[in-house]
Amino acid sequence: MVAAIRSELTKLTSTRMWWVLALAMCGYLAFIGAVMAFALTVAAGDATAALAPVEGEAAATTVYGLVNAVGYAFPLLAGSMLMTSEFRHRTITQTLLVEPRRTVVLVAKLAVSVPLGLVYGVAGAAGIVGAAAPVLAWRGDGAHLGSGEVWRVIALTVVVTVLWTVIGTGFGAVLTQQVAAIVVILVFTQFVEPVARVALGAIDGLDRVAMFLPGAAADGLIGSAFFAEMGEGELLPRWAAGLVLLAYAAGLALVGRLTTLRRDLG
């Protein structure tokens, strides 16, 4: 297992894609963080603003929590590429010749996705906090970086990003065609789930279903969500949200092992 993990780390670090995506995530979240911090602080002082007013520590946790709400496509893509790159470049046969135990190969990739997700989590948190905190301090009533709850939210965004990367690796084991995997991830994260959360949250009896969507569960683990602050549904408690995300990760990995990694890949 140790040799398999070392091999997967070598494959990962021999390419530029992982750090290019991390830089893109950091820059994107810095832009979003600054814009949303400005928008929320303007709304807090303007009763006619389009956004509902969110002030104080709630404004800080809402903005910093956007690492998950708008940035989770990046770790999903990075995690999926740990698997799909093997099929795109047709190196999966060589990988299985070196390590024929397919479960070991999958577990090694899942293990490598953890430190990879940590890098993405730190990059995302650094980008959004670095850009939003000065705006909140300038336009609002402070960045609240002395608050334990704020730092708890920031730390949990990193944890959630790690889980997204693991989920992405499991998804890549299910859908191995790289272009298709990228399209599905982008469509789901940028369109399907946001629309589903708003739509389900507006229907009595289905609002609880929305809490079990992966993005909503991630927000529940963080304990802060842009959707919740805007009045679009409730969140699961942190312990339950964590179990839901782990279930998504384990379920996708199991499906990938029982389908893709059972076939003849020669």
Image (cartoon, rainbow, N blue to C red):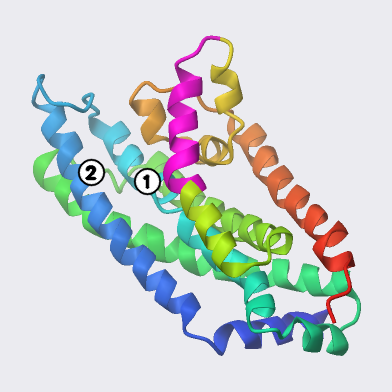
The segment highlighted magenta reads 188-204
- By secondary structure, the bulk of the magenta-drawn segment is best described as helix
- The answer for how far apart the CA atoms under marks 2 and 1 are is 9 Å
Q: Residues within 10 Å of mark 2 (few under 14, many from 20)?
A: many
Three-letter code, disc 2: Met
Q: Which residue is mark 1?
A: 66
Residue in the image at 26% along x and 51% along y: 33
The residue closer to the viewer here, 71 or 156, is 71
Instruction: Say above or below: 165 vs 90.
Output: above
Assign the C terminus to one quadrant of the image.
bottom right
Extreme top residue here?
204
The residue closer to the viewer here, 110 or 184, is 184
Residue in the image at 58% along x and 11% along y: 205
Residue 69 position within the rendered picture, expressed as x and y whole percent measured from the top left? 42, 44
- Place residue 140 in its image quadrant: top left
Q: Is residue 253 magenta?
A: no
Can I make out residue 53 in this image?
Answer: yes
Q: Are marks 2 and 1 in contact (CB under 8 Å)?
A: yes
Q: Which residue is mark 2?
A: 36
Three-letter code, disc 1: Leu
Instruction: Say above or below: 165 vs 151.
Output: below
